[in-house]
Amino acid sequence: MPLAPLVVRDLPDPPRHLWRIVGPGIVAAGVGLSSGEFILWPYIASQAGLTFLWGAVLGVVTQFFLNMEIERYTLATGETALTGFNRFWKHWGLVLATMVYFANLWPGWVMGAATLATYIVGGNPRTIAVSGLVAIGAGLTLAPVVYVALERLIFVKVAAVGVVVALGVALVISADTWRALPGGLLGVGQVPVDLGFALVLGAVAFAGSGGGQNLCQSNWIRDKGFGMGQYVPRLVSPVTGEPQATHAVSAFVFEPTPANLARWRRWWRFANVEQLLTFVLVTVVT
């Protein structure tokens, strides 16, 4: 089915209290806190010290600019990035979604987490993995508004990681490591080549989100009501969600009038600050 044409509407005003819509950057950081932070970068540090820490910062900062360009499109149209790609070629969304599924449905992710859990609480990794998948599926399916459930879970995850970081700072990190930290951040160009190109490059890519998680940034700001996303109903549970009116069109566009451009500058400034203080800051600290 062809996409409906864009409809002209005024850009909505940002809410008076912008802190109430903070969240997409935290979700991006929380979803991205996984194999890079818990496996790749600790391994690199154990083998080569902190000499390559600047590579993690490079990866996160690069993704910041990528995320903001993805957000720019949704702020201006209320349409996700995948749908925007479909306007160039109707199959782009399917191609990109399939690539994301292949990257994230690999059972090693949940089995790795389950195996780690057995070191803490005991039990069978397979049973824990299956139970975890069932709990995730039930939680997202039964939640009245999908994004709200995801956001709350991610806030809990980020808080838990914060506790781990605090314990590490207090009990594990030595004075020698603190003294090595500035060199790792500022020693741009130092690369632990002995670890292999694939591992080093993969670590940079896995610092932060990556791949489909960056594209989903547009879904998260739309569901949070950023910019023209205020005109688009939020995703609701097919089981418990309240019915909401839907629009006959998939996206909007605003005329570049002085009033709309003034609103745009406020939205764009807030979106950048929100991403810097949540996604970039949280990811770099961890």
Image (cartoon, grey):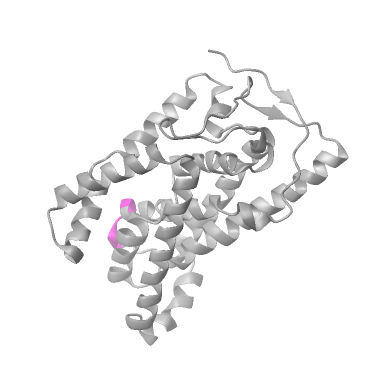
Q: Is residue 242 above or below residue 41?
A: above
Rendered-image quadrant of the C terminus: bottom left
Residue 266: give x, y in percent of width and height.
75, 50
Considering the whole magenta stretch, tell me its main secondary structure. Answer: helix
* Residue found 31% across the figure and 54% down from its top: 199
On screen, 157 above or below 225? below
Snapshot quadrant of residue 102: top left
215 is within the stretch colored magenta: no
Q: Quadrant of residue 85?
A: top right
Q: Is residue 208 visible?
A: no
Q: Residue 196: percent from the left, percent from the top?
A: 29, 56
Horizontally, is 14 left or right of 246 in the view? Answer: right
The residue range painted magenta reads 194-198
79 versus 224 height, above or below: above
Q: Residue at x 62, y 37 (%)?
A: 74
Q: Position of residue 282 (x, y in %)?
A: 49, 63
Quick check: 243 left or right of 41?
right
The image quadrant that residue 174 belongs to is bottom left
| Residue 73: % across, % down | 64, 36
Determine the residue positioned at 33% across, 69% down.
45
Q: Residue furthest right?
A: 258
